[in-house]
Amino acid sequence: MLDRERFLKVSELDAAKIKEMEDDKFRSFTVVASSFTETFPVQEDNIKNALRTKDVGALTKSLAIVCDMLRQLQAERLAVSCASRLATAGAVSYEELQAFAVEFLKAVSALSIDLQMVEYQDASKDSPERGRRSEGNNSILAVDDRHFFLNALKNMLQHSGYMVTCVNSGAAALNFLKIQRPGLFILDIEMPDMDGYELARRIKEAGHTAPIIFLTGNAHRDYVVKALQAGAADFIVKPVTKAQLFERIEKYIQPAYRDSREDE
């Protein structure tokens, strides 16, 4: 049976209800959780396709399915948010519904990834180095082939107390690591020449033990498991927000100082 304590740390789940479950009920809950991570990517793709084609009927149908799945999963806050928006779907503009769907999809994708991490970590008993805090080292190496993302990342982290280095390829990252040892890595998965999986493996082979956070655009199991096998400690779901970025980073390293401007 999966570790109950790991589920209690998943922020979007109702920890109080999970904690109170009898063992038989908890076992049933873990089956629901596993089923969710297997089936959600289908609805994730359906929602993305509906957004691309502006098909409101297909969009609301898929959102309703996910809403029901979340209720079974004890993810009440997300379920209520979805149900409330669906109740007013006919009275709001498509742009408002679209904006909600994008943010909602990102939140549910993050939940699905967190659940997959629970399953993977329980099966592997976790590496003692995976997710270990980098005490006293507040430097970050970010790797992405898109300059606009790296610029956005720098803007979000400016005045934060972190030392941030951005490079746009795996080769550039490996050259940097010949002389520096960051306290945290942020890697995009999909990059030309050397993808994030390969870069993570080579980082580990070079003896670096700092946590690796992967940037991902979906919650498909093959993406998540492959990243975990490559050494991922955590994930940030795109599009990246400042709040999510700081929440993930601060699990592993602390800034050297606090600057009031970082909340502006």
Image (cartoon, grey):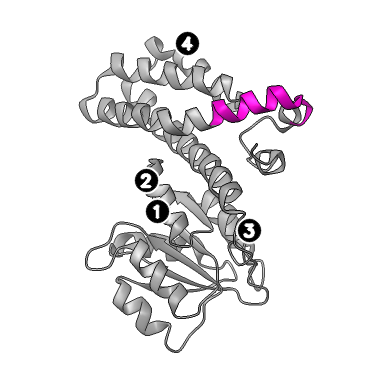
**Alpha carbon separation for disc pair 3 and 4:** 36 Å
Q: Residue at the location (54% across, 24% down)?
A: 70
Note whether residue 124 is visible: yes
Q: Pointer 1: what residue?
A: 226
* Label disc, if present, on residue 87 of the rendered structure: 4
Q: For numbered disc 4, what is the local secondary structure? A: helix
Residue type at numbered disc 2: Asp
Amino acid type of the residue tagged 3 in the rendering:
Lys
The answer to whether the residues at label 1 and label 2 have Cβ atoms under 8 Å apart is yes
Magenta region? 19-33
What residue is pinned by disc 3?
Answer: 251
Q: CA distance from mark 3 to mark 2?
A: 25 Å
Residue most extreme to the bottom = 179
Task: Say whether residue 264 is visible.
Answer: no
Residue 46 position within the rendered picture, expressed as x and y whole percent measured from the top left: 30, 26
**Tag 3's secondary structure?**
loop
Query: Of label 3 and label 2, which has the lower sequence position?
Result: 2
Q: Earlier in the sequence, mark 4 or mark 1?
A: 4
Which image quarter is the N terminus in? top right
Q: In terms of secondary structure, what is the magenta stretch mainly?
A: helix
